[in-house]
Amino acid sequence: MANQASHSRRASKKQAAAVPPVVSVIMGSKSDWETMKNASDVLTEFGVAHECRVISAHRTPEVLTGFATTAEARGIEVIIAGAGAAAHLAGVTAAQTVLPVLGVPIESKALHGLDSLLSIVQMPGGIPVGTLAIGASGAKNAALFAIAILAGKKARLREKLKQYREKMKRKAAEETLP
Ligand code: C2R
């Protein structure tokens, strides 16, 4: 399974080289990748060209400004930002672009992600960040949310989303208990 995932990530990297990314998955640290790869895997499954990068509002503020202020011109349509603890990445990104920014709170060690969640969700009025759940579910749903945004003008993605829901419904209905 892990091999399959890393194989599809390699394939997605090749695809990304050929097709310009429309979704950008950024994260505050390499240590967030285990969580954020769930977003990348869903985007790959739906055939959405995307890029994954480590950028930090705290550690690399100039890089973040460069990224956020040029994302729209590069053809990016949605940004997914995962960060943990004092998680300012999503908010500072949203402050510098009008692209939709989806925030994923990483499950921190000290406070189990409650710190990340509150840092991302409590934005002052005017600069929205769409905040998802803490951890892997949040990363997965951020990708599905990004796909739903893109599906507004891409019928192929809308159809795929409907098939995805159908598959999930069938699986849940067929569930048996030991
Ligand atoms: P390290 O594991 O590198 O020490 O990072 C990262 O997202 C990570 O979850 C610990 C945590 O620090 C977070 N971090 C942020 C930001 N940059 C890094 N919250 C930011 O800019 O918001």
Image (spheres, rainbow, N blue to C red):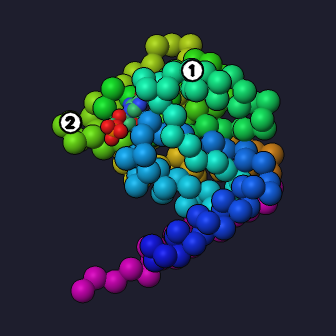
Q: Is residue 6 magenta?
A: no
As drawn, the residue found furthest toward the bottom would be: 178
Contact? badges 1 and 2 (CB < 8 Å): no
Binning the other alpha carbons within 10 Å of mark 2 as few (below 14), some (14 to 19) or many (20 upward) gives few
x then y, percent, for residue 58: 42, 23
Q: Give the range drawn in magenta.
A: 155-178
Q: Tag 2: residue type? A: Leu
The kind of secondary structure element at disc 1 is helix
Inspect the magenta stretch and tell me whether residue 170 lies in it.
yes
The earlier-in-sequence mark between 1 and 2 is 1
Does ligand 1 reach within 8 Å of label 2's beta carbon? no
Of the pair 147 and 18, the residue shown nearer to us:
18
Residue where numbered disc 2 is placed: 111
Residue 78 appears in the picture as rendered: yes
Mark 2 residue element: loop
- Tag shown at residue 7: none
Q: Within 8 Å: ligand 1 and the Cβ of disc 1?
A: no
Q: In this view, does 115 lie above or below 5?
A: above
Point out residue 170 in the picture as x, y percentages from the top left corner.
Answer: 52, 76
Circle on res. 62 = 1
